[in-house]
Amino acid sequence: MRDFQTPGRSAVFASNGMCATSHPLAAKVAVETLEAGGNAVDAAIAGAVLLGICEPQMTGIGGDCFVLLKPAGEERIVALNGSGRAPKGLSAAEMRGRGLTTVPLNTADAVTVPGAVDAFCKLSADWGKLGLARSLAPAIRYADEGVPVAPRTAFDWAASADNLQEAARAFYLLDGKAPQPGQLFRAPGQAEVLRRIARDGRAGFYEGEVAEDMVASLNALGGTHTLEDFAATACDYVEPVRGGYKDVELVEHPPNGQGATAILMLNILSHFDLPSLDPFGAQRAHLEAEAAKLAYDARNRFIADPAHTTRLDHMLAPETAEKLAGLIDPKRAMESPAKLSEAVHRETIYITVVDAERNAVSLIYSIFHSFGSCLASSKFGINFQNRGAGFVLTEGHANEAAGGKRPMHTIIPGMLRKGGKLLMPFGVMGGAYQPNGHARLITNMVDYGLHPQAAIDAPRSFSGAEGMEVERGYSDAVRAELAAMGHKVSIPRGPIGGAQAILIDPETGVLQGGSDPRKDGCALGY
C-alpha cells in the first residue's frame, strides 16, 4: 500500500479487461475496442497504431514491432517478430568505402523496410476477432481530426525538431516549429494510408501507390530501396527465450531483439544479495550498473539477425553469468567493457492489453531514435525508422550491415510467469535502457516486494555509453557515493525510460495496471 500523503499514482484495478500504455487516448481506444467485443489483439493494434499519431516522435507505420501473446485458455506464449530488413542493396563494404565507421543516423542508409504493418495484419488475421479495419478506425479518425499534443510528447518533440529534414519538416512541424502542449497535430496523409491498409490489407502499404511513394522518396535521398524489398517484407513467428530469477520466469523475445540481455543481467545479479541492500541506495545501483556493462557487452558481441546469432546458448548459460559476476568489484566501477553500439535514446511506445478471456498481449513498436531517421515520404508523410543504425560496419561481425538482413534491435516486450502461469505482461521503453529496465522492474518486485506501480514509479539509473545517468529521484548523497566508486555520474536531461504493466492477481484473477508517470499515459480497465 502506497503512502497516500506523498505524490504518487495508485494502481488501476479491474476484473474484465485492461490496457496500460503511454497515452490516455490510446488506452481509452483499446478499452473501447474490448467493450465492443474485440479481444486483446484487436485492442492492442487499435491502441498501438493510434500511438503513432499521439506520439509520432516515438513510433509510426514506418517502424517495426515485436509481440508476445498468451492465448486465452492456454499458458503457452507466442512471439511474433515484426522487424523489417535492410534493402537488398545495402552494403557495409560500400559504406566503409565512403569512410564511414558507423551507419549514419539520419540518412537513407539507416532506413530498413518497415515491418510493423505486416505484423499487425498477420496478428489481426490469426488472433483477432473484429478484423483489421475495426482496429484501424480510431487511428484514422484521430489522424484526420487531430490529437492535442500532450506535455511529455511536446517535451520530446521540441528536443528533436531541429533534426527533421525536408519532407519530415513539412509533415511534423507546425509553422516550422515543434507543437506546444494542447496544439492539434493532424496527419491526413497517414489517415489515407491506414484507410488503404484497412481496405486492402498489407498490399495497401507494401504495394501500389504507398510503396511507390516510400521507395521514390528513399531513392531521392540516396537509398537503394526497391519495390521488391517492400513486397518481400514478412513477419515471423518465433520461439521466446526464457530465464528464471528466484521464483519467477522471465519470457523475452529472441534475437534480433535484445531480450536475452535482460535474462543475462538477472543471471548476473542473482549472484549478489540484493534484498540486503537499500533498494534506492548506491550499492544496489552500482551492482546493477556493473551487471549492465557486462550484459550489454555480450549483447553487442552476439545478438544479430536470427540467422547470424550463434552464441545465444552461451550468453544464457549459468556458467557465463557466474564468470561475469566474478568480474564485478562491489566497491569500484569498471571501465565499460565496450562502447554501446547505439546512443541512449527513448523513442519507443509500449502497450499491454489483457481481456476478459485472459488473452494477453505485450507489444512494443518503434522507429528507433526520435522521429527515426528524421526523413519522411514526400506524398503521405510516412516517417522512416533508422533501425539500420543498429547494424555495425565491422567486417565479419555477426551484426554487420548487409542487404536482406535484420539489425540488432533494442525493443523488447516482456512477460513474467510464476508457477507456470502468466503473472504479468510488461514492457520498459527507453532504447538501450530496456534490458536494464526489465531487470530493475523485476528485482524491485521480487527482491523488494514492490507492487508493479511502485516498482515503475521508483527512481532509475543507467550506466551507458556516456557514463551513469542517475534520475533526480535519487538523493545527492547517493550520487556522491556512486561518483566516489568511480562512476561518471550525471542527472539526465529527461527521465529514463517508461514502463507499463498489468499484474494478473493469481488468487483473485483481478487485473492490476501500472503506468509510468514519466509518460503521458495511464492504465484503464473495465
Image: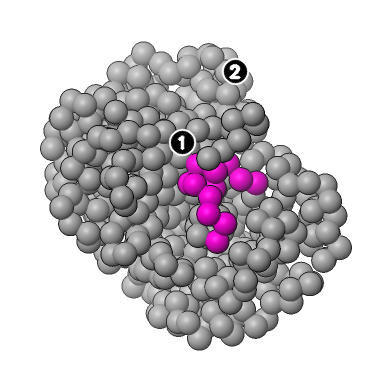
- Left or right, 391 with respect to 289, comes to left
Point out the stretch of residues depicted in magenta: 447-459
Question: What residue is shown with label 2?
Answer: 180
Q: Is residue 436 above or below residue 368?
A: below
- Kind of residue at disc 2: Gln
- Kind of residue at disc 1: Ala
Q: Whole-percent x and y of residue 214?
A: 35, 39
Q: Whole-percent x and y of residue 18?
A: 32, 35
Q: Is residue 11 visible?
A: yes
Q: Residue at x 41, y 70 (%)?
A: 243
- Left or right, 294 with respect to 409, comes to right
Q: Residue at x 53, y 54 (%)?
A: 449
Q: Is residue 398 above or below residue 153?
A: below
Front: mark 2 or 1 = 1
Q: Are marks 2 and 1 in contact (CB under 8 Å)?
A: no
**Total residue callouts:** 2
Question: What residue is shown with label 1?
Answer: 11
- Residue nearest the viewer, comparing 93 with 275: 275
Q: Residues within 10 Å of mark 2 (few under 14, many from 20)?
A: some
- Residue nearest the viewer, comparing 31 with 197: 31
Indicate whether residue 454 is drawn in magenta: yes
Indicate whether residue 422 is drawn in magenta: no
Q: Residue at x 41, y 16 (%)?
A: 146
Q: From mark 2 to mark 1, how far is it between C-alphas?
A: 29 Å
- Residue nearest the viewer, comparing 325 with 179: 325
